[in-house]
Amino acid sequence: MTQRGNIKMKVTNSQYWKYQFLGWSFASLYWAYIAYFKQDYSIFYTVINFILDVIIGVLLTHTYKLIVKKRTYEPVNKFSFIQIGISVTILAILFMLLNNIKWYVYWVIIQQREFGFITSLFFWDPPLVTGFRLMSIWVLAYRLYHYYKQQIRIAEHNAKLSILAKQEQFNHLSKQLKPHFLFNSLNSVKSLISENPSKARSSIDLLSDLLRSSIYTKENLITIENELQLVYDYIELEKLRFEERLQLKIVIDKMALNYKIPSLSIQSLVENAVKYGIQNSVKGGIINVNISKQSSNILIQVKNPGQLIVKGNNDVSLGLKNLKKRLQLHFKEKAKFTLVESFNENEVVATIIIPANG
């Protein structure tokens, strides 16, 4: 066990004993009042009686704790009520017997009164009734407390497993995404080598900067502002190949700049727009990126000229599946992604909706 775990255990044990003695002391004050004012105990014997009452209560309940310490606590149900009933009955009987022995010692041995031992030992009203009441409260409180603590531990354990599983999924998706981006960029550079060597050299420099900022980032979420910088760098790289055929227009609500999104999400959509929209058009076209904050959501739209071709295209399918999975992992059902074709305008529209509060 770690030092932190030891400290936590010591604090928990300290609180347990504090509440044990405080609780039983509070209950024993009533019996001390009865002993002093109604049974004519002296102050000395009233104090002794008070101390013994606290010891009896702590002894019985702590023994119960030691016996059931390693068990698994379930919600209170029909079966557990039977177990609780048996436990409370046994504790109440022991409570009665110990208190009657204490009573017998005082009145018979110290005060020299004549009472039969067996009769005194099994005198049940009020010791047994009081024992049932107090032990019921203690056992139920103890079980409910540990059930609550157990549920917290289970929730923490499941949360840790979920985080580890998500992190593994992110790593796997990232390994898929970045080579896909790299290969597409290298193809762009390759096409320039024979056509324009000087542009090819410039594109290699751009690609180097782009890879440095995208591939080696360790963050799963980055701000929209930083994501757009990747988009600008990527477009600058592709413009070396497409020149005036490729245009980028970005309209963004400044309030949305600092919100975080999965890294390479907008860049992936722009990359697909270039590869399957601009590249297939003789005249090229404009890629429109619109980002706005609408109520409690961030709306991101990427529009490009062309037609929607997803079936049979593994690259597009992989990129879209990857993006959908990452959005789901980060935002669950709160995030939406759609890719549709506008037949009237010969345009493909990709839309991401994520919660503004993360």
Image: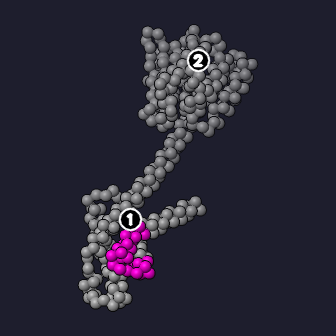
Choose between 58 and 334: the one closer to the eye: 58
Residues shaded magenta = 25-49
Q: Look at discs 1 and 2 and give the one toward the viewer.
A: 1
Any mark on residue 209, and which? Answer: none
Residue 293 pos. (x, y %): 52, 23
Callout 1, which amino acid? Arg
Q: Which residue is pictured at 63% across the width and 36% down the height?
A: 217
Q: Is residue 249 above or below residue 33?
A: above
Q: According to the image, label 1 marks what residue?
A: 71
Q: Which residue is pictured at 26% across the width and 65% down the height?
A: 82
Residue 243 pos. (x, y %): 65, 13
> Looking at the image, how many numbered discs can be counted on the residues?
2
C-alpha span from label 1 to label 2: 62 Å
Q: Which residue is pictured at 26% across the width and 86% down the height?
A: 118
Q: Is residue 288 above or below residue 40?
A: above
Q: According to the image, label 2 marks what residue?
A: 250
Confirm whether the magenta stretch covers residue 338: no
Q: Which residue is pictured at 25% across the width and 84% down the height?
A: 119
Q: Secondary structure at mark 2?
A: strand
Q: Secondary structure at mark 1?
A: loop
The answer to whether residue 77 is left or right of residue 46 is left
